[in-house]
Image (cartoon, helix red, strand yellow):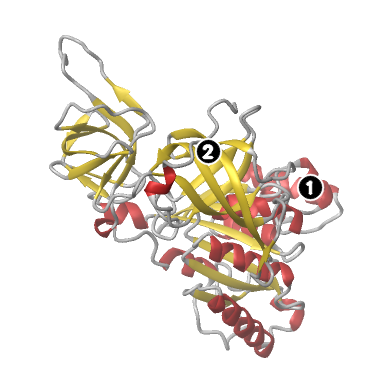
């Protein structure tokens, strides 16, 4: 089959699972892997042995994903468990995220690159506080597709009214968050109903099984309509006799399509030129699309370094002042005045936390002002000042080039994940220089 931007974009689905503790996330993931024939024989044998040693007659499929010893002992998911599997119709990268409130930051990690989120609820409990929290996180991270998996339908006698009431409540709440695509599926992960195979107990449900929906949901986007963004990772200058004048810029295309002859802008310098050539896997090509790793050659011999952004189409305006929604990931609180490193694509610069504008109540989405900082798992709004200008897109427009990390300059610990809003006016960025000796 000929590879095209379209087939590359739609052949892989990244999705995350989330839900409250004991809603059955790990069992659901295990059922998906088992029933789709994605479990190796030795893995299944190990699970069967572990289940027997715990006094269980049937294999506990949750053990396929609860890989940490602490998870097995406690019976909960703590870390994000990534799994790869494939069917005849699509390849999948799955992130099984924790359900406990203290691990909300882990859900942010798992959902940050997901194109779909599966939110589980226990049919006996319905939509609970943690369900709303996970829906809100998915909305904040702009996850385009959400699946409500109403699990443990076998424990409510497969009753349609129970499913319908839960689906209506969740869909209404998700719509209020701005989530446009919500599909509800009644399942029993333990028994396998509507996970991979249709259920014989719910003939009132005429929709797809969970796997059928995962295989057919439209993913990716129209690459030709996205502005191309190419963060430079490495400058290649072999200076050999065979290639005395070769100068290329290696990296991974973050978004869009780049073609030979395209006019581009190098940021933050603002120099303009055109694409003279593209090299992929040692061969010249006329076109590259996200997320390909390529080497780009430019028509003009201009100064381009690691961390610069080669942009085609409408280019972001470089700025030193950034407003952003952030999720704080570290046990150490993020306070106004904190001196941090900001990593955006391949560029890392010094930054100052000028203001913590408010903290978001993740259950009501109310903005609670007056916060003196953000604690672990808090989501809030901050104002940052960077030592050097950055070319960030709005996270709403581009999840790759609109996101960043805040890092502790002392030990390199990741502190905060950020989603950039609209940049301030660039004139303002030059009036108040950042402290130069804070490192």
Q: Position of residue 402 (x, y in %)?
A: 44, 51
Which of the 4 image quarters holds residue 233?
Answer: top left
Name the residue at 34% across, 48% down.
Answer: 317
Name the residue at 46% across, 65% down.
Answer: 144
For label 1, the SS is: helix
**Residue denoted by label 2:** 342
Q: Position of residue 437 (x, y in %)?
A: 57, 25
Q: Between residues 29 and 316, which one lies in front from this camera angle? A: 316
- Gap between marks 2 and 1 measured at Cα: 36 Å
Going from N to C along the chain, the mark reached first, 2 or 1, is: 1
**Residue denoted by label 1:** 72
Outermost residue on the right side: it is 55
For label 2, the SS is: strand
- Compared to 319, does 114 lie above or below? below
Q: Between residues 362 and 104, which one lies in front from this camera angle? A: 362
Q: Is residue 420 left or right of residue 64?
A: left
């Amino acid at each position: 089959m000929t590879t095209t931007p379209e087939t590359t974009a739609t052949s892989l689905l990244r999705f995350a699972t989330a839900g409250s503790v004991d809603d059955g996330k790990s069992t659901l993931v295990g059922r998906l892997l088992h029933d789709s024939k994605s479990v190796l024989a030795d893995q299944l044998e190990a699970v069967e042995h572990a289940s027997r040693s715990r006094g269980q007659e049937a294999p506990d499929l949750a053990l396929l994903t609860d890989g940490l010893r602490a998870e097995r002992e406690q019976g909960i998911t703590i870390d994000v468990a990534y799994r790869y599997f494939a069917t005849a119709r699509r390849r999948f990268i799955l992130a099984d995220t924790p359900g406990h409130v203290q691990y909300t930051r882990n859900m942010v990690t798992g959902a940050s690159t997901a194109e779909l989120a599966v939110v589980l609820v226990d049919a006996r409990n319905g939509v609970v506080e943690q369900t709303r929290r996970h829906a809100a996180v998915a909305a904040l991270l702009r996850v385009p597709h959400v699946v409500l998996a109403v699990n443990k339908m076998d424990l409510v006698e497969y009753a349609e009214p129970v499913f319908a009431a839960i689906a209506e409540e969740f869909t209404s709440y998700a719509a209020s968050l701005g989530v446009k695509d919500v599909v509800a599926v009644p399942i029993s992960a333990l028994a396998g109903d509507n996970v991979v195979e249709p259920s014989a107990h719910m003939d009132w449900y005429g929709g797809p099984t969970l796997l059928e929906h995962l295989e057919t949901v439209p993913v990716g986007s129209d690459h030709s309509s996205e502005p191309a963004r190419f963060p430079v990772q490495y400058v290649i200058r072999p200076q050999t006799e065979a290639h005395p004048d070769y100068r290329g810029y290696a990296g991974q295309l973050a978004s869009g399509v780049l073609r030979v002859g395209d006019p581009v802008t190098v940021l933050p310098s603002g120099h303009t030129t055109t694409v003279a050539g593209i090299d992929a896997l040692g061969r010249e090509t006329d076109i590259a699309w996200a997320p390909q790793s390529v080497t780009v050659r430019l028509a003009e011999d201009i100064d381009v370094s690691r961390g610069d952004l080669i942009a085609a189409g409408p280019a972001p305006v470089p700025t030193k002042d950034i407003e952003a929604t952030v999720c704080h990931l570290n046990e150490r609180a993020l306070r106004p005045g904190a001196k941090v490193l900001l990593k955006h694509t391949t560029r890392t610069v010094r930054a100052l936390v000028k203001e913590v504008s408010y903290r978001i109540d993740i259950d009501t989405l109310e903005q609670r002002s007056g916060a003196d900082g953000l604690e672990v798992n808090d989501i809030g709004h901050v104002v940052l000042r960077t030592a050097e200008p950055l070319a960030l897109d709005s996270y709403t427009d581009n999840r790759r080039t609109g996101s960043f990390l805040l890092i502790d300059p002392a030990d390199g610990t990741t502190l905060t994940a950020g989603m950039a809003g609209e940049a301030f006016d660039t004139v303002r960025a030059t009036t108040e220089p950042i402290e130069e000796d804070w490192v």
